[in-house]
C-alpha cells in the first residue's frame, strides 16, 4: 500500500499504565478503572470538568486522545483538521448494561437520559471532537479484535481524498474490568511507516 | 478512481418485504406506523412500525433453523438473501460485508431473553450474518448513531476505491425494544401521535424497525435498473454537544457543502433532498438552518419518518433506497405528516407526491455524538 503516511505518535492505556510513544507517563496500581482514570486525569493536568460526566468508555478514549493531542501543542482556540476513526469489540455494552438495569424491573424503573446518551460507541468521538474543535470525519467500527488492515485502509482513504490532514485512529475497549486503549496519529510526518504490520507491532508492545 | 454505484436493494418493513412494494405504499401515502400498547416495551401507548414476526419467519431462507436466529438476524438475513440472489455476485474474497446498526441484538440483554448474552456483541451479529452466507471476509460493523446507514455507503465506496473490494453488501437494521424506547422517552423525545417532520405542530419522533440491504459495486455489469452512482460524500462533526444538534447546523452545513463539492456539481444540480427530519423541535430546526446556509432552501425535500418512524441504524440506507426509486420513477414522494412549515428558515417540503424528471439527490443524516453525513447520488443512465 501507500507508504507516504506515518504513525506520528501513539498512546497506550492498559494494565494501570499510560504510555506515550512507549514512554510511561502515568501509573497507578489499582484494579478499579474509575480510580485509575481519575488519578490519571489529575496527574496529567487534564483540566476539563466535562470529563466527570462521561461514561467509562468515553473517559478512556478521552484521556488517550488527550495524551496524544496535548503532545501536538495544538492551539485550543482554533479548529483542527483531524479525522477520528475508532474501533472496539464491546461497543457501548458497558453503559448498555447500566441502562438495561434501570429498565429491567418495572417496579423499580429509572431510565435516565444522562446514561442513555452514552449507549452509543461514537459518543466518545463527540467528546474528543468538542474538546479539540474537530469538525471532521468520524466513524466508529466494531471488530472482534484490533483490525489493523481495515483501520489503515480507511485512514489512507481519508488522507488521500483530502478528507483530513491527520487521522486519530485506533482501539478503545472497555468491557467489565477489562480496558485497553491504543490510539495513534496518522500523518504525512513521522518516522514509523503507516503499515498494517507496524500498527500490529505497536499494539503488541 | 473507479466509479462506485449503489445497485440491487431490498427493504423488509411493515409496508412490505421488497423495495418495489414498499415504494408503491409510499406512493399511495400509506404509513406503516400504528398505535401499539405493549407494556413490556413502554408503560404508555406508542406509535411504531413493526415487522410482523410470523410473516418474517415464513420468509426466512432457512425455515427449519429459524429459532437459532434473533429477530434482528432474521430481518437482516431475509433482506440480504434477496439482494445476494438478485445480484448474482460470486461470493469470493473480493466481496465485503458492512453491517450498519446502532444497537444490534440489544434485546438479548433483557433478563428474559432466551439467547446467550454473548449474542449482544455486535461482532457476534457480524459473524452470524457472515457465516450464514459463507462470506469470505470479516464483517465490518459500523455503529455511528443515526448516521450509520448513510455513512456505511460512504465507507463502502472508500473501501472499493482503495481496491480492498469490488463489491460490498451493506445491511442495515435495528429493532424496536424497551431499551430504545425507554431511552428516547427519558429524553422526552417521543411523540404520542404519528410524527410530523418539519411541521408547525410536530411533537417528536416515533421509532420503527426495518432491515435494508444494498449492493455497492464498481462492476457496471452488476447494476440494477434503479442503480445510482455515489458522486460525493462527507461526514462532519458539530464539535458542539453530544445529545443536542448545533444551533447553527455547523456539521450538517459542512457535510452537505463538502459532499456537493466532491461530487463536482453545483447546488442548483440537486433535484431533491432526502432529509433526516426526525420531527423533534431542535433537529428539524437545525436542518432548516443548515440547508439554507448551503442555498438549498427552495429544493424539494422530504423526510420519510412519517412512513416508518425513525429506524436508527437502518434509516439512512432505507431512505437512500427510496431515493433511488424516486429517481428511477421520476417521482417526488410526499413528506407524510407535513401540513404547515414549522421551522425558522424556508424549506420546500413535498406536500403531494408528484411526477418530475429527477437526476440527482442528496441524502443527509444527523445523530447523537454530533455526527452528520451527506451523500450525493446520481441516476445511472445507461
Image: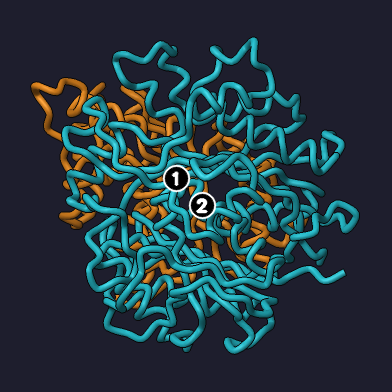
Chain colours: A orange, B cyan
Residue B5 left/right relative to B319: right
Residue at image mark 2? A85
Res. A164 visible in picture: no
Residue B204 vertical position relative to residue B45 in the rendered view, above or below: below
Label 1: chain?
A: A
- Counting residues from the N terminus, which is met first, the one under dot 2 or under dot 1? 1
| Rendered location of residue B339, percent (x, y) | 33, 73
Q: Residue at x 30, y 77 (%)?
A: B340
A83 to B144, vertically: above or below: below
Which residue is nearer to you in this view: A181 or A96? A96
Q: Is residue B206 above or below residue B27?
A: above
Which residue sits at x=25%, y=57%? B204
Question: Which residue is found at the position 43% from the left and 63% from the top?
Answer: B276
The crowd level at tag 2 (other Cα within 10 Å; few <14, some 14-19, many 20+) is: many
Q: Which structural element holds mark 2?
A: strand
Residue at which label 1 appears: A11
Residue B354 appears in which quarter of the rendering?
bottom right
Amino acid at each position: 500500500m501507500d507508504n507516504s503516511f506515518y504513525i506520528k505518535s501513539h498512546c497506550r492505556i492498559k494494565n494501570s499504565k499510560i504510555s506515550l510513544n512507549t514512554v510511561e507517563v502515568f501509573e497507578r496500581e489499582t484494579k478499579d478503572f474509575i480510580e485509575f482514570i481519575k488519578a490519571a486525569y489529575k496527574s496529567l493536568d487534564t483540566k476539563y470538568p466535562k470529563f466527570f460526566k462521561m461514561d467509562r468508555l468515553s473517559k478512556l478514549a478521552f484521556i488517550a486522545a488527550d495524551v496524544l493531542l496535548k503532545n501536538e501543542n495544538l492551539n485550543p482556540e482554533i479548529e483542527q483538521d483531524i479525522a477520528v476513526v475508532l474501533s472496539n469489540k464491546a461497543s457501548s455494552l458497558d453503559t448498555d448494561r447500566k441502562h438495561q438495569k434501570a429498565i429491567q424491573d418495572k417496579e423499580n424503573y429509572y431510565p435516565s437520559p444522562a446514561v442513555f446518551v452514552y449507549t452509543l460507541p461514537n459518543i466518545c468521538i463527540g467528546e474528543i471532537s468538542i474538546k479539540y474543535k474537530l469538525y471532521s470525519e468520524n466513524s466508529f467500527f466494531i471488530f472482534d479484535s484490533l483490525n489493523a488492515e481495515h483501520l489503515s485502509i480507511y485512514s489512507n482513504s481519508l488522507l488521500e481524498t483530502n478528507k483530513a490532514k491527520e487521522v486519530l485512529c485506533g482501539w478503545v475497549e472497555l468491557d467489565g474490568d477489562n480496558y485497553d486503549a491504543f490510539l495513534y496519529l496518522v500523518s504525512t510526518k513521522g518516522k514509523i511507516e503507516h503499515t498494517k504490520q507496524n500498527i500490529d507491532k505497536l499494539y503488541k508492545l | 478512481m473507479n466509479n462506485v454505484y449503489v445497485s440491487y436493494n431490498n427493504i423488509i418493513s411493515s409496508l412490505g418485504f421488497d423495495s418495489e412494494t414498499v415504494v408503491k405504499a409510499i406512493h399511495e401515502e400509506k404509513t406503516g406506523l400504528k398505535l401499539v400498547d405493549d407494556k413490556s416495551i413502554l408503560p404508555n401507548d406508542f406509535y411504531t412500525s413493526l415487522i410482523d414476526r410470523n410473516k418474517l419467519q415464513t420468509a426466512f431462507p432457512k425455515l427449519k433453523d429459524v429459532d437459532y436466529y434473533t429477530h434482528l438476524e432474521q430481518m437482516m438475513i431475509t433482506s440480504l438473501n434477496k439482494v445476494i440472489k438478485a445480484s448474482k455476485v460470486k461470493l469470493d474474497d473480493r466481496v465485503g460485508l458492512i453491517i450498519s446498526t446502532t444497537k444490534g441484538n440489544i434485546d438479548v440483554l433483557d433478563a428474559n431473553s432466551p439467547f446467550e448474552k454473548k449474542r449482544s456483541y455486535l461482532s457476534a451479529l457480524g459473524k452470524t450474518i457472515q457465516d450464514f452466507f459463507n462470506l469470505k471476509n470479516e464483517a465490518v460493523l459500523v455503529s455511528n448513531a443515526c448516521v450509520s446507514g448513510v455513512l456505511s455507503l460512504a465507507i463502502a465506496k472508500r473501501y472499493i476505491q482503495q481496491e480492498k473490494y469490488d463489491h460490498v453488501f451493506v445491511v442495515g437494521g435495528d429493532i424496536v425494544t424497551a431499551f430504545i424506547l425507554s431511552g428516547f422517552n427519558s429524553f422526552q423525545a417521543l411523540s404520542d401521535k404519528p410524527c410530523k417532520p418539519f411541521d408547525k405542530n410536530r411533537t417528536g419522533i416515533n421509532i420503527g424497525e426495518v432491515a435494508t440491504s444494498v449492493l455497492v459495486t464498481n462492476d457496471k455489469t452488476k447494476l440494477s435498473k434503479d442503480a445510482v452512482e455515489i458522486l460525493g460524500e462527507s461526514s462532519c462533526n458539530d464539535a458542539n454537544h453530544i445529545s443536542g444538534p448545533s444551533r447553527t447546523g455547523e456539521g450538517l452545513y459542512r457535510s452537505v457543502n463538502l459532499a456537493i463539492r466532491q461530487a463536482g456539481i453545483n447546488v442548483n444540480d440537486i433535484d431533491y433532498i432526502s432529509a433526516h427530519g426526525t420531527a423533534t423541535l431542535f433537529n428539524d430546526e437545525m436542518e432548516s438552518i443548515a440547508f439554507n446556509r448551503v442555498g438549498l432552501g427552495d429544493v424539494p425535500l422530504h423526510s420519510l419518518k412519517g412512513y416508518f418512524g425513525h429506524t436508527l441504524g437502518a434509516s439512512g440506507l432505507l431512505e437512500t433506497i427510496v431515493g433511488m426509486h424516486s429517481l428511477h420513477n421520476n417521482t417526488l414522494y410526499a413528506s407524510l405528516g407535513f401540513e404547515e412549515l414549522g421551522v425558522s428558515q424556508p424549506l420546500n417540503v413535498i406536500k403531494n407526491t408528484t411526477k418530475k424528471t429527477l437526476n440527482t439527490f442528496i441524502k443527509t443524516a444527523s445523530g447523537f455524538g454530533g455526527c452528520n453525513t451527506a451523500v450525493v447520488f446520481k441516476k445511472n443512465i445507461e
